[in-house]
Image (cartoon, rainbow, N blue to C red):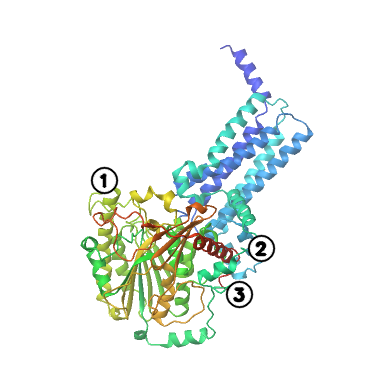
Amino acid sequence: MPISVITKKIDLLKKIDFSFLVFWIIAYATRIFQLLHLYFSETPSGGAFVERPLLGVACAAVADFAAFAFFGILYCLASFKLNKVTKIFRISISVLTLSYLVFCGVNDQVMRWMGQHVTLSFLTTYSVSKLEPNLVSNIITTGFWNFVIAFLIVIFTSTLWIVHQKKTVSKNPSKILLCSCIAVLSIFMYISGNANNFFKPCHIRWQRIQPPYVTILNDLDYQKQHSVKPVNYARGITLLGGNPDADFPFYHAEENESGFMKEFKAKPLSEKKDVILLSLESFRGWVGDFRIGKNCDRMPNLCKLSKRGTSFPYTYSVGYPSTEGMLGLQLGIWSHPNKIFLSNLLNVRARALPEILGDAGYHRIVLSAAEPSFDNFTPWFEKWFDVSEYNPQVNTDIPLAERFIEMYENRPLDKPLYFEWINFVTHTPFNVPKSYATPAETSDERYGQAVAYLDSAIGIILNTIEKSPRAKETIIVVTGDHSIANGKAQKKLDELGEANSTYTWTTFIWAGAEIPESSYVSKPVSHVDYAPTIMNLLGIKASNNFVGHNLFEENYQYPTFTFRHNDAISRKDSIAIFAQLNNKSFAHARRQSNVVDWDTTETIGGFVAEEKIAVNVEQGADALLDAMDAWVWILDKNLLTP
């Protein structure tokens, strides 16, 4: 090609206004830098923001693309004609984009410090709160350079835009190029805007990576739908066991708590019990039912423990995944049907069991084989426990049990102990270490390997406790954080809803000090009963917001509740009622098992669902939905604790 032709083409390109492309590249590149800064900088508690930061950045970048594609489309539309009005539009869009980047930066910092997105609830809470000078000083000191970098990223972007705008002198925008950019950006905006549905890596990380605009839009839509107190609030609260006439329907006040705590602390250590909670990831109730011989053969240590104490083979989590298991056990409340409490409702006033035990002088430890930040446990662990440990090098159950021994034996010997141990091998895809066994081909077979491996680790822990001088003053509790459906049950999700047993049915094993031996209680019970039962066994009296009851209470007669994405199930005695918001045809009843009545030829894949029964449940289902609405009101309006 002749040089003259090339020169003419270059001259032509120089006359075309590419400012819309430069604008979009600068804006989106700035967001990528912000994400790199968020995911690869150290958090205030130490360590990385997530265990796999590169994958986190990639997923967040895909999710965030939609907002910047939208700004790019607006800028393109404002570029078809160049005049004073166009210039004003361009400046307005630039300011809007820059403001959104600032908001993204603020959201990132809140995520780093508090583990939650900037929500309307967050803004409402902290716009009227009084910050302690020491707290502000600590935040500034600890995160000084982090804040500086976040500030400089935005300042650099602003400077780049201003310089570029001054150099843009062309008055010949290419309409073909503008239309092409609008078309391409529109396609990718649609794909990115549905990243939660289109891409599995984005879906499983959505609570963490969702763009700030999504959080605010969801909040606005949710507030519109829940702006009025439910009509049948009183009926719902009554069904849940609360007092509908009280400002805080589930709050239990202890008037002389401070005096009691002083007396409790003054007791000799021999009169105080240690509590060891073994929280098992995705532990299926039908696999942990040790009335079944095959389960005992697979897990002899847990089977032996069940015979040394009391088992509740029909125990239900308040929801799933692990965030809901933690919520039910430690905070003693039901899950939010529409939100994830530990991620979205950090500002709700509530008092957890570990906080009460801390006030009573307990040394509190949590040891986890899974990255706490993934489930947003980090801020809660820092609040609830004196020692919180996660080591990515100790992420299988037997090494984790050995680490338990080290921490157990080196704990302060002048304080009672509260220790939560959280395993991981029973999490999907259920792969045991290759040194233990070659992972099986099917999911059910791998699960069998995983629980057998887990049982070996639990044997190490139990052996250590039995040899301890505090063995007779120790309460051991074993439960799953939730369950997980097998292949057969997953196919029936539309029929059973998301709150069904295969996701929530786990087990309780209680053994140790003052626990009845060789006892099986077949009534359905809930994770929310854990905290009040522990307090009763320890003899601790404290104000709380627990919705459950003492499991060892004579004549225990209470329904259990599970909420999940507008699905609800209540269980009492022999009947489980299923209800679904805005879907009356879904309502039905199933027989709540109290005997082993499912296919035990396959102890892992055999259970699918309880037997459906022909019972008119219209009134019961309506009341259950009223209870769910009332509970949403309690959480959204911050009515757990004064």
Dot 3: element: loop
Instruction: Tell me how far mark 2 sits from mark 1, CA to CA.
Output: 54 Å
In the rendered image, residue 75, in percent from the top left (x then y), is placed at: 67, 36
Q: Nearer the viewer, residue 18 or 86?
A: 86
Dot 1: element: loop
Give the number of the mark in front: 3 or 1.
3
Q: Taking 175 as reference, is 50 above or below it?
A: below
Q: Tell me which corner region of the image, top left, top right, bottom left or bottom right, holds residue 219.
A: bottom right
Amino acid residing under circle 2: Ser
Q: In the picture, which quadrant includes the C terminus?
A: bottom right
Instruction: Tell me how far mark 3 sits from mark 2, CA to CA.
Output: 30 Å
Q: In the picture, which quadrant includes the N terminus?
A: top right
In the rendered image, residue 543, in percent from the top left (x then y), is placed at: 52, 78
Q: Is residue 626 left or right of residue 405?
A: right
Q: Tell me which corner region of the image, top left, top right, bottom left or bottom right, holds residue 140.
A: bottom right
- At x 44%, y 44%, the residue is 200
Amino acid residing under circle 1: Glu
The circle on residue 441 is 1
The circle on residue 245 is 3
